[in-house]
Image (spheres, grey):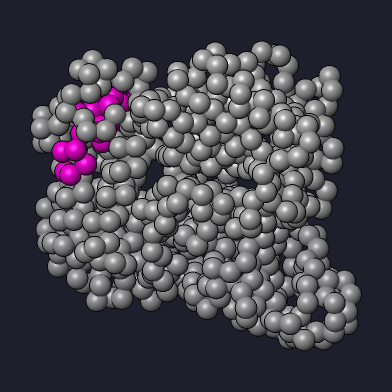
Amino acid sequence: MKKKQMLSVGAACTLAVAAFTSLCAESAPDVTLGGFSVGDVKLMCRERNGWKVDFRREAEPGGVEYAVVEMSRGEPEYPAAFNLSFNFAKRDIVAAWRPWSECSGFGMYWDPANLPGAGHTDFCHSMPLYACYGSGGRNRVAFAASESSEPIVMKAGIREEDNRLYFSFHFYDTKVAKRRHLVAKLRIDSRDVFWSDAVREAADWMTEVSGRKPANVPDAAFAPLYSTWYNFHQNVHQDEIERECEIASKMGMGTIIVDDGWQTDDTNRGYAFCGDWKESKNRFPDIKAHVARVHAMGMKYMLWYAVPWMGEKSANYSRFKGKFLYHNKRLKTYCLDPRFPEVREYLISTYERALREWNIDGFKLDFIDAIKVPDRDPALGDNFKGRDIKSVTEATERLISDIYKRLSAIKPDVLVEFRQAYIGPSIRTAANMLRVSDCPADMQRNRRGIVNLRLTSGKTAVHADPLEWHPTDTPEAAAKNVLCSMFSTIQYSMKFAGLDKRHADMIEHWSRFGAAHVDALQRGKFKAYHPELAYPLIEGESDKERIFGVYAENTIVSTGALDKPVYILNATDADSLVVEIPAKAKIVPYDTYGINGMGLPYEAGCHRVSVPPSGYLLIRK
C-alpha cells in the first residue's frame, strides 16, 4: 500500500485537532472535517460512554482518501455508535452500484429527517461498498468501509431541491464485542478510473485492511459441476446419482454437489428433519461405497448441510433445546445459537466425520445468513448462561473459521461453497467457492450476480447458480444460459439421462471450452460494462488471450490490441456481431458446438461479422 499522508497543514490541521478536543467531552457535538473530495464530512458521536475519539483525514497520492475514526478507552466496552455523513452535487453521475442490488438508481430524499436506506451489511450480509459512476463507465466516487464483520447501515438519497446526493454510513448502532481500541475507516475513491476497477480495488482494500487471509482455492473449485437441487430436489437416490455422474463426467463435469434429501426420506420441503445429519438408508444404503464409485468416474463429491437448522422432528432437537436463537414456523425448524461452544463443536465434528468416514471432498454450507438475533435476544433472559461469546456475529465468524481450519487440516484442498449474500473478506476465510443466490432459470439475474461476485471476491472461485432450462428448448436458446455464466464456474442442474443429444453436445463443448480458457474466463483481469443495462458486455483477459461476452444485440466490441487471440461470445439471438479491430486480422466464426465456419480477412475498422447465435468468433492477426 502507498504511504499515507496525514492532513497536517493550515486550517485543516486546526480543524482536525479541534475535532479531537471537542470529542473528549462525554456528550459531544457534531464535528465537521473539510478537505475531502466529497466536501465536508460530519461525524456524529453523541453518546461516547467514556471513549476518547479522534476524527481525522488521511490521503494517498492520486485520489484515494480516508475518513478515520479512532476510539480508545481504559476498560473494555461496547464501541460508541457513530455515523459519517456528507453530500455533494450530482455531476455526471449516471447510476450507482452495490454488491447485492438489482437497482442502479438512487432513493429519493424527501423527508429531511429520514435519509433513505441503501443497505445493511454485516458478517453474513454483503459488504459496505457503494459506487457512483458516470459517462463512459468512469468512476466518480466509490465508498468502502473497513468494518466487514460488524453491522454497517448505509443510507443514500438524492434531494430534488438541490440535485445533490446525500450519504451517511452508520457504525456500531448494534452492540458488538467489547474492546479497548478500534480504528474504523471510510475509504473514498474519486479517481478517474474505470468503474469496475474502482470497485474491485475497494473490495481488495477491505480484505487487506481486515487482516484476514482468504481460504485456499484448489483447481477443482474452477471445474464445472453438477448439482442435484433443481432437477431432483429432495428426491435423491444413490443409483440415479451415479448414472447422472457417469454422463456428467464424460461431458466435462469435475464435481457433484448432492443437495438436500440425502439425509431424510421426507420430500415435503421445509427443514423439519435437519439436524441429525445421518444418511437415509433407503436412499443411500452404502454412502461410502457410493462416493468411491463417483470418485472412480473422476468426479469429486460434495454434500449439502443447512448449518444452523435443527428441525422440529430431528432426534437432536431435545439435546439442543434451549440453545436456539429462534423458531421458524414456516420452515419447521429452529436456528442453533453458535454462542454455545457445544453447538459449534457438534456442527464441526459432524462435518469432520463425513469428511473422514465417507471420504467426501467438500461441503455446500447453507443458510449461514439465517444466523441472526431475533427482535429479542434469548440470551438476555438468562444473562448469557452457557455462552462463551456474547456477540452472535463474533460467534458465527468463529464457527465458520473453525470449520475451515479443522476440515482443511484433514484435507488441505477441501471444497467449501457459500452463496450470496454472505460474501466478503470475513466469509472468504472459510470458503473457496461463492455462488450466486438462487435464481432458477433466470439467466439475466445469474449474470448480474456473477459479475457482482467477480468484482468483490478476489481470487475466490465464483460459481453460477445451477443452470436449468426446458428440455424442448433449442440448443441455441439453451446455450444462452451457459454463455450468461461463462465468466464463472458453471453449475448444471439438468437431468442428463435422456437429455437431447444436441443439448448434451452443446454442454460438452462449452465445458471443454471453459476448461481450456479458465484463466481468461475466471482467473484473469475482469471488466464489466454498463451495470445500469445489466452488463451487456463482459471482458476477461489472461496473459495468453482476451475473451468478450456479448449479451445485447448491436453492442460494439472494441477488441483492443491484437497482441493475443481474441474470442467474442455471441450470447444473443442475432446472427452477427459488430466488431472494431485496430489492424488487419482474420476472423473465424464457430457455432455453439464448436464447429468452425470459413474464416475471412478484415481490414482495420468497424465491421458487422456473421456468427451463429450462441456461437463465437476467434480473431487473430
The part of the image, by quadrant, that contains residue 246 is bottom left
Q: Is residue 556 above or below residue 263?
A: below
In which quadrant is the N terminus drawn? Answer: bottom right
Residue 501, visible in the rendered structure: no
The percent coordinates of residue 556 (x first, y second) are 81, 63
The part of the image, by quadrant, that contains residue 555 is bottom right
| Horizontal side, residue 292 vs residue 401: left or right | left
User: In percent of the image, x 63 and y 55: which residue is there?
Assistant: 3
The percent coordinates of residue 415 (x first, y second) are 33, 61
In which quadrant is the C terminus drawn? Answer: bottom right
The percent coordinates of residue 589 (x first, y second) are 70, 78
User: In percent of the image, x 48 and y 41: which residue is there?
Assistant: 148
Residue 556, visible in the rendered structure: yes
User: In percent of the image, x 26 and y 33: which residue is there?
Assistant: 389
Stretch in magenta: 323-346
Q: Is residue 593 magenta?
A: no
Q: Name the residue nearer the viewer: 283 or 487.
A: 487
| Horizontal side, residue 258 vs residue 355: left or right | right
User: In percent of the image, x 50 and y 62: which residue is there?
Assistant: 459
